[in-house]
Image: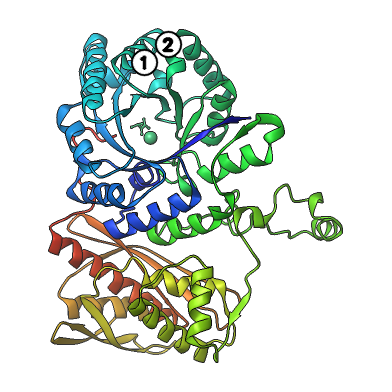
Amino acid sequence: MSRVYIFDTTLRDGEQTPGISLNVEEKLEIARQLARLQVDVIEAGFPVASPGDFAATAAIAAEIQGPVIAALARATEKDIERAAAALRQAPKPLIHTFVATSPIHMEYKLRKKPREVLLMAENAVRYARELVQDVEFSAEDATRSDRVFLADVLSVAIEAGATRINVPDTVGYTTPGEYYKLIRYLKENVRGINRCHLSVHCHNDLGMAVANSLAALEAGANQVECTINGLGERAGNASLEEIVMALTTRQDTYGLSTGVITEQIYRTSRLVSALTGASLQPNKAIVGENAFAHESGIHQDGFLKARSTYEIMTPESIGLHQSRLVLGKHSGRHAFREKIRELGYTLNDQELEKAFQRFIDLADKKKEITDLDLEALLKEEIVMVPESFILDYLHISSGNHTLPTATVRLILGERQMEEAACGSGPLDAVYRAIDRASGIVMQLESYSLKAVTGGKDALGEVTVRITANGFSYTGRGVSTDIIEASAKAYVHALNKLVHDRGLGVGTRQASEEGT
Ligand code: KIV
Ligand code: ZN
């Protein structure tokens, strides 16, 4: 069976999802999980785009062992040098450089003639190869490029030293049949193509990113670029979990294997969703809430007689187990520590103690504590930015004949700031009061509330996205009290903002041409 290499670009193309921004700690946490998932390549960022992107790529390069670590660079010396600098500590660095090859991009975006683009590609790859051994060249907008010119550019890139070439469907325009033929054509017409990885990279504008990627693999591509949960620009990129599970479930058709540990898929999806604040549609293939749910009586009946009647893969194969009762009020620290280890989290003593106290508090309010509850609490403990502002006190008054009012007290170092505010509802009042107390006015861009498990006493998990001065931050909070969860999520986002300002690091700054 031939091996397909999984090139994950959640932290680069996925992070280009409108409204999403991850800080260094969050990217690092996702990279650790991608390493557990055993993807072959982690594209960690676009270092020249912002100091934050550079720092995250460098941190991932310094820590993550196993996968190749890639950094994106336009076909310029400055970009390539920044990428190489960010990858300095990576055991297996990969510079991914690109230039557009379609007539539309060359004429309107680059304002360059085809021969100039050809030269840019050649120079970029040659320069990158002076700095690292592994260089990928992408012909941006390949699927709307002239095939003969495309084959020429890719041949030149390989001659200049590219070890991987990529054929992106940048705007999600191609179709499975057309992409299959393009890959076959390139395999026959690009000089030296058998010496390097042939990669595909599909966007989902017409909802065909996964189908297109699979068609390309059938045509002989051996690397596929994709993101967790299909995150990415506009309609997103091809979804990693869908590609991997299609190859696994339909090995009879594809005859291809990957190195991915599929049992890590569900956890990776949830982590990415929690940290990006991008929740999943319930019917999302593989990882959506309903992906393994059987509603109709006929389906349930068949399923109970034989799972295979309506189930083509098991929930266990993606690491989705029935939520189990894990611990109770009387469980001690030892059992708690063991459970944390079993769930795959590593906390230091201080974090563990804090998580244990939160677990005890929760056990007082909620009868049954499941894996999902624990994971929700743990996710709050990991990837925390320093808690500059602490939500010390919260009181609300609300009802159907009352003007909603909130009082909050925030602590910042030695200072205590107490403020009250009214609002159109309790949440509005709380957020106004927090703005007043912190002295920082933030715009709430999105808000989502989800129950972690069923039951009236369920934990509520709130994710908010706020903007201030053109930068956006996500925050998460969990509590059995949804107003408290909402306030915690808002303060979490506020602390990220404070942290970034302190570091002088913004989230993504627009690059001149973008990607
Ligand atoms: O979609 C695209 O063309 C890209 C390239 C930078 C590979 O993301
Ligand atoms: Zn892309």
Residue at the (62%, 37%) spot, across then down? 247
- Camera-nearest residue between 295 and 309: 309
Residue furthest to the front = 91
State left or right for residue 300 relative to residue 440: right
On the image, the x and y values in percent for residue 472 come to 26, 57
The residue identified by callout 2 is 190
- Camera-nearest residue between 355 and 411: 355
The residue identified by callout 1 is 154
Which one is earlier in the sequence, the residue at label 2 or at label 1?
1
Residue 46, above or below 291: above
| Picture quarter with the C terminus | top left
Element type at mark 2:
loop
Residue at the (30%, 60%) spot, across then down? 25
Q: Residues within 10 Å of mark 1 (few under 14, many from 20)?
A: many
Element type at mark 1:
helix
Residue 510 seen in this snapshot: no
Quadrant position of residue 278: bottom left
Gap in Å between the C-alphas at discs 2 and 1? 6 Å
- Residue 323: which disc? none
Residue furthest to the right = 305
Q: Residues within 10 Å of mark 2 (few under 14, many from 20)?
A: some
- Camera-nearest residue between 368 and 95: 95
Ligand 2 quadrant? top left
Residue 376, above or below 119: below
Q: Amino acid at mark 1?
A: Leu
On the image, the x and y values in percent for residue 7 come to 44, 38
Q: Amino acid at mark 2?
A: Val
Residue at the (28%, 60%) spot, across then down? 473
Residue at the (41%, 27%) spot, across then down? 168
